Image: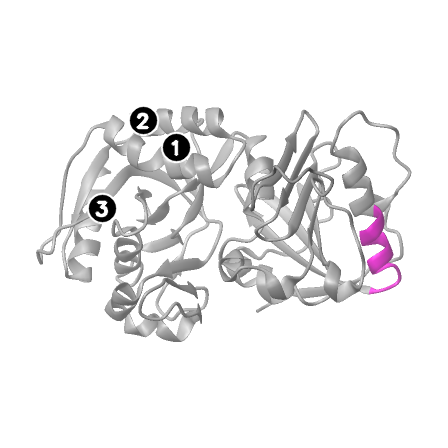
Amino acid sequence: MPTSELLVQPAPAFLNCESPPISSPANNYFQAARKIFAQATRGKTIREFFCGMGGCSVRLRLAGESLVPLVLPALAHLQIKSVASPDLTICLGDLAELELALEFPGEESNDMEPPGAMWRHEDARFFALAQKETNSLSLLDAEEKLAFYWTRNAARLPWYENSFPLRHLLAHFFRRHDRHIIHAAAIGDETGAVLIVGKGGSGKSTATLACATNGLFYLGDDYTLVGIEPAPRVWSLYSSAKVNADTLNWFPELKSFVHHSGGAKKKSSLFLHGTPGLRFAESLPIRAVLWPQITGRAETKLTAASSTTLLLALAPSSILQTPGGGDSVLRALSQLVQAVPTRILEAGTDPAQIASAIKKFLANEN
């Protein structure tokens, strides 16, 4: 994993704890997170990683080492050279590794709160999200272009978190730039990309990997970033993919890239950056939205589908999996399926034919 290590001076300028009073339920937690990050890193070497995503530059500053293998692998394909004034800086730390304590929002809640509930706040300046499932706290100050991510114990994070790290912080940040993280895969060629949508078991990952291993560009399997204006466009976020055992058997060349095996019954996750023969694209115009249907036949073909049908396949999971942007995400996706062709991808059993059908479609659309 290529990363850069930089020595930083104690108490860098953006960690200045002298902050005027701000009327926001999130501000106290943000200032506490700021102070504890300054305490954890004072006089120490900080590992920094810069990536370009969604047309923006993002700097990750990691206090300690435990989060490096949990955050950076999925973003490795987006690494860029250092930027003096990035669009967003995210400071990350593991409280257990650093032997520090930080109060999370919601800890004073009563016993009526359901298990796994989240404490969430959003206003014109701040975003805050405390997650019980991951025991993590995400905070963002849009005015300072500064965010924090703290976990109680990186060793106890669910296995799937490193497949799409920081997605809630990134989702909130990009909504302010009129871009949205959605639950959709994307593959394409030099002329543009198709989004592949659908819930688990619909054949989304199978179709995506079939295309990626047969020469098309890969932009993502589970989550991608889209913008509608001035024209529909998709950006890559993560190099990861999640597949079940049957799908993985279709692509034996990818088995060495599995970082978590789900065995015969559950999904496995892969990091595809560095896979020989796979081509990544940072961003492409969107040419169509496809909904795969597994047919059991050998041949693959695309058939007509209404924009409403594709919106119903795309919107619910996109809204539920990135809480807080429901109305804006729905508006954007409604505009998207009206702006580009929508099709059913009747996916056959031959991966090469799936890729061939999509290549032919892209050629005919341009």
- Asked if residue 263 lies in the magenta stretch, the reply is no
N-term-proximal mark, 3 vs 2: 3
- In the picture, the quarter occupied by the N terminus is bottom right
Q: Point out the image quarter for the C terminus.
A: top left
Q: Which residue is the site of mark 3?
A: 292
The residue positioned farthest toward the front in the image shown: 111
Q: Where is mark 2, residue-wise?
A: 339
Is residue 356 among the parts visible in the rendering? yes
Residue at the image point whose x is 45% and y is 27% from the top: 229
Asked if marks 3 and 2 touch (Cβ < 8 Å), the reply is no
Q: Position of residue 50 (x, y in %)?
A: 64, 54
N-terminal of the pair, mark 1 or mark 3, is 1
- Where is residue 206 drawn, in percent x and y? 27, 57
Q: Give the residue displayed 59% in from the left and 30% down from the top.
A: 176
Name the image quarter holding residue 118. Answer: top right
3D distance between C-alphas at marks 2 and 1: 8 Å
> Which range is magenta?
35-44
To which residue does mark 1 refer? Answer: 232
Magenta part mainly helix, strand or loop? helix
The kind of secondary structure element at disc 3 is: strand
Q: Give the colouring mode of the picture.
A: one colour
- 318 or 346, nearer to the observer: 318
From the viewer's perspective, tell me whether residue 72 is left or right of residue 307.
right
